[in-house]
Amino acid sequence: MREYADRILMHTAVRGSQVDRNKTPISPVLGIVIAAGLAYSFATSTRSVLAEAPNESPTKERLIRLEEVHEHNRTADTYWVFRGDSVYDITDWVPNHPGGEVILRAVGGSLEPYWNIFTIHQKQDVYDILEQYFIGKIDPRDLVDGKAPTGQVEDPFKSDPKRDAALIQHSTRPCNSETPESELGSYITPIEKFYVRNHLWVPDVHDADSHRLTVELYDGEEVEYTVADLRKKFKEYSITATLQCSGNRRSHMTQASRPTTGLQWGVGAISTATWTGVRLRDVLADAGLDVQDPDEDIKHLKFVGAEAYGASIPIDKAIDRHGDVLLVYSMNGQPLPRDHGFPLRALVPGHVAARSVKWLNKIVVSDEESSSQWQRRDYKCFGPNVGASHPDWDAAPAIQETPVQSAITAVRQVKADRLKDSGLARVYGLEEDSVVLEGYAFAGGGRHIVRVDISPDRGRTWMQAQLQEDGAKMGASGSPDDHRAWAWRQWRAVVPATQISGKFCVKATDDSYNVQPDTFEPTYNFRGNLANAWHRVLVSRDDKPVEGQLGK
């Protein structure tokens, strides 16, 4: 039956060799990354795969001394773990672990201390798959009160930074929190309100200047830079760019279509900042890459983070002089906060935020994309007919540029006299009680937002919102003729109260005339990625948004 388990576990494909090539000292606490690996690996497709497995006679139970389990640690040829009084041989699975060989810090001992920290493991699907690696029971002579001693492990989250209480929290360990609606109306998002998307804990780096970045060229040659080197050696650039999580508005897809896997974000897994750093293109050229005419076999650029996260982008984006990919050390004029990549992160504007790897410590020039699960599995989309049980992961390309998106972030009723006092009556030619709507619109790939359409009657009639002037500050260039619109556009619309019939809708159009779809069903995918159907807000009879509706 192990071959059936392996079909699931392979979706965490990260090569152990990637960690070896990283040459970054491995802290013992990183062993706890086993939790994240098991969570991702075990939670996908388990029920269907188990149902397919043929009936086999159970493994003959044998008794194993605890001392023998301890011998199958990271120095051995085979790797064992135990849970309760059951022993499992996970040797065949270790090379597929998303954190590479750091999992070896946990073998030879108990899983339970790790699972007590990463409680996502505590569900039947995980237990069922783990049983496929069962090899025996711990000898009763080694049990204390019927249990094997588990020991204690260091909590890797204990040094995580404190977060602003206003952030809308979806998980605490790791932290995943979205920007509150009240802050989505600001062109530049305050640092403390910038949404947080972490896959594991936050690395605790103290000395920014001495932090090392290794650049590995296609021929295997490596060049190292400290952050201090980057600041001193290369010209500094600043751009204003929006980062958007691939799962932004996933909850809307779930509510309007079918269940999706992953964190159920509302409209706030998106934020904008001014980023400062050096051009990746300049660093690669200095390291020895021919950025004018690279070897035709070079297709990708891999990023590796200090906490084992990995992703990659096409080499054409990495070396494009107009692509504005930066190695960033500053955010809104301040040093990068720990939650956002201190001391160094990649910034890949116009692409899904999953490619802007934080806590960056290695870059690899390659002929293939990153083998991490976050490149090969998580951030992909499938057809509406494809379920979580049988996706062909290799058939779907990894998400890079994001589609056109918009959302309503504020709805407020304004009396006629206040409308006049604010000057909006003159701008919109209205002299009656009205409803003011505000929101954002964004398109990936550097495409400009050219129009935002508002409907006060569920899509039967439409009007155009006013794009705010701050949108002219988009990214590295404000010219409407280029494709370097890296930041969102803020918009506002004023609608007479008499025209409202229960629900507002918003849709945006970019300069390639890509338009948001009206419903989620045509673009439904079980991962809930790139949810960008019209945003709808239900309005009550007194012309106020129904409580909680802005996130729907």
Image (tube, grey):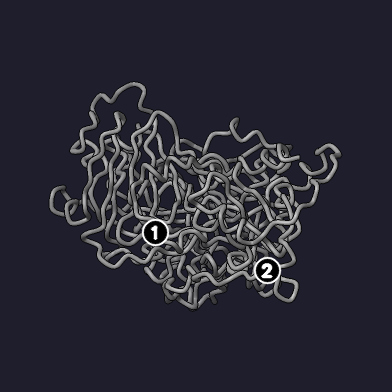
Count of numbered circles in the view = 2
Any mark on residue 6, and which?
none
Task: Tell me the amino acid under the disc marked 2.
Answer: Ala
Residue 104 in the figure: left or right of residue 207: right
Neighbor class of circle 2 (other Cα within 10 Å; few <14, some 14-19, many 20+) is: many
Q: Which residue is mark 1?
A: 272
- Residue 300 in the image: state x and y as whole percent: 39, 33
Q: Front-most of 450 and 147?
A: 147
**SS assignment at label 1:** strand
Q: Which residue is mark 2?
A: 148
Q: Quadrant of the N terminus?
A: top right
Q: In 3D space, how far apart are the residues under numbered discs 1 and 2 (Cα atoms)?
A: 50 Å
- Work out whether residue 499 can be spotted: no
- Residue 20 in the image: state x and y as whole percent: 39, 44
- Residue at (70%, 55%) from the top-left corner? 126
Residue 335 in the figure: left or right of residue 139: left
Q: Front-most of 292 and 480?
A: 292
**SS assignment at label 2:** loop
- Residue 365 in the image: state x and y as whole percent: 33, 34
